[in-house]
Amino acid sequence: MKISLRTKNIAGIAAIEVFLLILLIFTAISFSTHIIDEMLSKRASATAELFSTVVKDALLTNDINSLESYASELLKKPDLEYVKIIGPEQQILVSLSDNNILSRAFQLDQRLSDVNDGVFDTFATIDDGGSSLGRIELGISIQSTQAAMTKISTWSLSIATIEIVLVATFSYFFSVFLFRQIKAVEHSSRQVQKALKDRDFALLSLPAGANEELSELAKATNQVILSFQQELDINNEQKSELIKLNSELEAKGLEHTRHITKQNDQLIKAAQDTKEIQQQLLQAEKMASVGQLVAGVAHEINNPIGFVTSNITTLKDYISAYQLLVHQSQLVVQELSQQTHPQLQLLSELLSKENFVFINDDIEELLTDSKEGLDRVAKIVQDLKLFSRIDKNDKQLFDINACLKTALNIVNNELKYNCEIVTEFGSIPEIIMNVGKLTQVFTNLLINASHAIKATDSFGRIGIVTSLQNNVIVVKITDTGIGIAPDTLTKIFNPFFTTKPTGLGTGLGLSVSIGIINELNGEISADSEVGKGSCFTIKFPLTNV
């Protein structure tokens, strides 16, 4: 069975879209599961080790009251299910939690897949100078972790389904429209070709359909055909010139085709670079933000790729044929302008009536718009590539203002629905920095500001100001969010501390940020007022220049 070009086009686009979305969903879910598994295991081990250090002194003095107090304080964590402190003789000194949980046997869990009772069990030995004083056993509920994984899977599948429906609908309607135009031009071209071969234009007449663009072209061509039969002898003298012109136009068409092919290769490379960038997003805080940004990034990348890659090559070929046909008609009118044949005069009036110069210019503008779509893809990929280099230690001279603009591009989809961005970039020198890591710091601060504004249920404002003060580069990021309480403000840079609901934050964003800033010999501070907003100030001395 012969498959039409339209069907192949729709099926090809749909197949590629489905394959890429399935690959993206599978990779995102697998990568998210691995990261969440690793974070849970590290958190459980770190909590047990830290708690064993805290209770060691009380265990040495056999201070049971202190041990119970420490255990009670630890159990205030929302997802801790139980805590046991076991002495050197395997006697249980402290055991706090629900009786149903304490009554079951302890079974060490290494991974999330090992858990079969809803609680991740771990332990830590309490050592003092090489001798064992006992051990700590504790359990962490995985309910919030499982809910987060389920939510990631649900969002990914929903986005994929919507994307497939939109692409299929767009491809179908656009293909129907495009191939209807192509068929009409193809039919007309074949009739003209046959008439030229037979040297018989008497019975040749192109149909003038309802389509506005092709109808006028068909009428004008019919007039040319009638005149052509009468002036055939004169036109034979112009044959060599027309053949030469045709060769030049074909050469230009081949040049444009090579240019489009080169652009398509650049798009394929850009898509491969984007995939590599996504695989390099290894840190936990970045994974927390990927779920919020992936929809906007996919939208920005897929739209330019779709309308440029699928249609521009075919459209360019048929535009060249259209321009050739109109140009040849104009040449005929110019060569026979001194004659008074009524049909020739009618053809001249028709060609003058239609503004073909405007049509040709408009076609060039359409191709320019397609090029702008490619530039959008390149800019998005460039910003993502810069952001993905946080795990590398290479440093270079770079502009902090450029880092801030990159971060704004990355989180634009997160910010634009919640707040307006007001920037005041001062004239500051470049400093030696790790561009990817500093971009991550600004990204974390902007996302936190967006969350703070979103919590107010109103459209807010984020301000970014850079300046040079006493040989120190100062960056201020302010927001009109809910603010931070004074007792909480002193803890925001501590690892694992978060004010966000369980499953929405890891407590590592600001901790990682202060580490990066210290590595660059800078400093960060925060001021906040509940109900009015917050201001984060970052300073870099010019010793980094």
Image: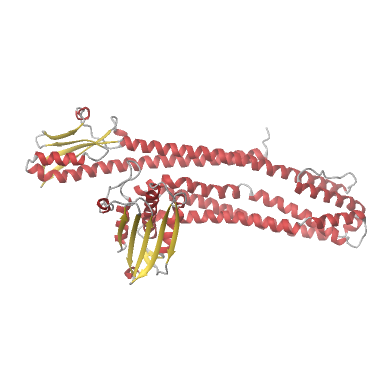
Vertical position of residue 122 compared to residue 278: above or below: above
Vertical position of residue 84 compared to residue 344: above or below: above
Between 228 and 298, the residue placed more toward the observer is 298
Q: Residue at point 31% right, 43% down?
A: 39
Between 475 and 514, the residue placed more toward the observer is 475
Quarter of the view holding residue 183: top right
Q: Is residue 230 left or right of residue 244?
A: right
Between 408 and 279, the residue placed more toward the observer is 408
Vertical position of residue 469 compared to residue 146: above or below: below
- The outermost residue toward the left is 61
Quarter of the view holding residue 70: top left
Image quarter hosting the N terminus: top right
> Residue 186 placed where, x, y %?
75, 45
Q: Is residue 219 left or right of residue 122?
A: right
Image quarter hosting the C terminus: bottom left
Q: Residue at point 66% right, 40% down?
A: 6
